[in-house]
Amino acid sequence: MDNIKNYVGQNKDRFINELIELLKIPSVSADSAYSQDVINTADAVKASLEKAGCDHVEICETPGYPIVYGEKIIDKNLPTILVYGHYDVQPADPVELWTSPPFEPVIKKTDLHPEGAIFARGACDDKGQMYMHVKALEYMVQSNSLPCNVKFMIEGEEEVGSPSLAWFVERNQDKLANDVILISDTGMISNTQPSITTGLRGLSYVEVEVTGPNRDLHSGLYGGAVANPINVLAKMIAQLHDENNHITIPGFYDKVEELTRDERDEMAKAPFSLDAYKQALDIQDVYGEATYTTNERNSIRPTLDVNGIWGGYTGEGAKTVIASKAYAKISMRLVPAQDWNEITELFTRHFTSLAPKGVRVKVTPHHGGQAYVTPIDSVGYKAAALAYEESFGIKPIPVRSGGSIPIVALFEKELKSKTIMMGFGLDSDAIHSPNEHFGIFNYLKGIETIPLFYKHFTELSK
Ligand code: BES
Ligand code: MN
Ligand code: MN
């Protein structure tokens, strides 16, 4: 423990500078304008794994962006940890809301990060958190303290739904064989109260198109006489929730597992200030499903949210027009036992049924995945809890997160092992938003905590 603290202390400037170099490459997987940058980032990750001490590293081609695979196998009889992370990032837009350019990383202090935080797209999600694992390996190799085998699988398509990863995992089950999967791509409660993410929500993401007349029309000559696709779309969307903010899609809740009162009481023990929450977001009040708390609404309950809506005239000034088409992108966050394919079908059927005769509706599924819950009595969870306790001096709390890493449920199905999510980000780190950042404290604490997981996992596996 002291050794890793010393090592981090002596090397922290280099660790920060290496991450900064990685963050300069704009590996935006959603935008093909950046495709060469995404590929270059894979090469940079490969080089970093080689330097850190992997015996074998390769770029694995897929139908999409490559997966970087690395390993260090010290003894076939020892346990194997498979580290998963992603080197792609979300688009940076709206760029004008960044206080410094998204791909020119800078260190700035914030209220929650008095030691400073690195501001850049991908700083926390997930380059910074992924790179903690590379540096933790470097330490274990340098200090001759790697207690078990390790494999890395770092992908470049997580932010677009991991379309090639399932393909890769299905074809490489032997190569990826492991005893536990370790991911740092989530958050924790605060720097003084660590937590371990035990749940991720599932996801169904769809796009809808409502078509009215065959061309845009003069809103005076035709207004009032034909269905306006934008009016209709707004009305259809409004009908997807009732007055209690329950989702109205028939069958949507059929498989949702209700938590017991005891489980909900246990959850409510995690420190949380509603006032601080409202203040941080500058809102007068929270909003959501009746009879559930804010922390329940954003973790153990399914949701339906419009992510984008467009159509008609949005340029300068006014144009009197009835658009021919209106569109929306809609995400549904799902909880265990809800099947994302089934939910996509239920949505499609219900949404289509809401359309008046004057319009046509098309629903196109984008991507999705199942929810995931990891048990807290597994060797992996216990090892993670001991690791946090040792490095923070405080016992971590298990917390179910609202976010999704859809591929995790598939890992369990294909590779038959549990996933442990040791996240070091904070909700306020603005992932996917302008001014994303990752605390220096969090980055270095992550590097310190990871080798302790290796140690405890290997010991507890004996
Ligand atoms: N790292 C996030 C997911 C996350 C963040 C989970 C914080 C828990 C806490 C991941 O990169 C992500 O953004 N996932 C997407 C889904 C994906 C299919 C685009 C999400 O949750 O929206
Ligand atoms: Mn991520
Ligand atoms: Mn993300």
Image (cartoon, rainbow, N blue to C red):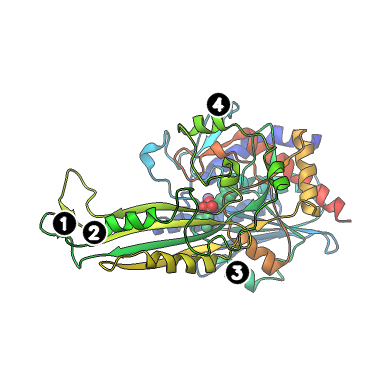
Instruction: Please provide percent x and percent y for residue 86.
Output: 57, 54
Q: Earlier in the sequence, mark 4 or mark 1?
A: 4
Classify residue 268 by image quadrant: top right
- Evaluate whether residue 384 shows in this view: yes
State the separation of the CA atoms marked 3 and 1.
Answer: 52 Å
Label 2 belongs to which residue? 228
Q: Which of marks 2 and 1 is nearer the N terminus?
A: 1
Q: Residue at horizontal 73%, vertical 59%?
A: 418
In this picture, residue 279 sits left or right of residue 210: right
Query: Which is more toward the observer, 202 or 54?
Result: 202
Find out whether the residues at labels 2 and 1 contact each other: C-beta distance under 8 Å. yes
Find out whether the residues at labels 4 and 1 contact each other: C-beta distance under 8 Å. no
Label 3 belongs to which residue? 168
**Label 2 CB-ligand 1 distance < 8 A:** no
State the separation of the CA atoms marked 2 and 1.
Answer: 8 Å
Specify the quadrant that holds the N terminus: top right
Neighbour tally class for label 3: few under 14, some 14-19, many 20 plus, Cα within 10 Å: some
Q: In the displayed structure, would residue 185 be above or below residue 441?
A: below
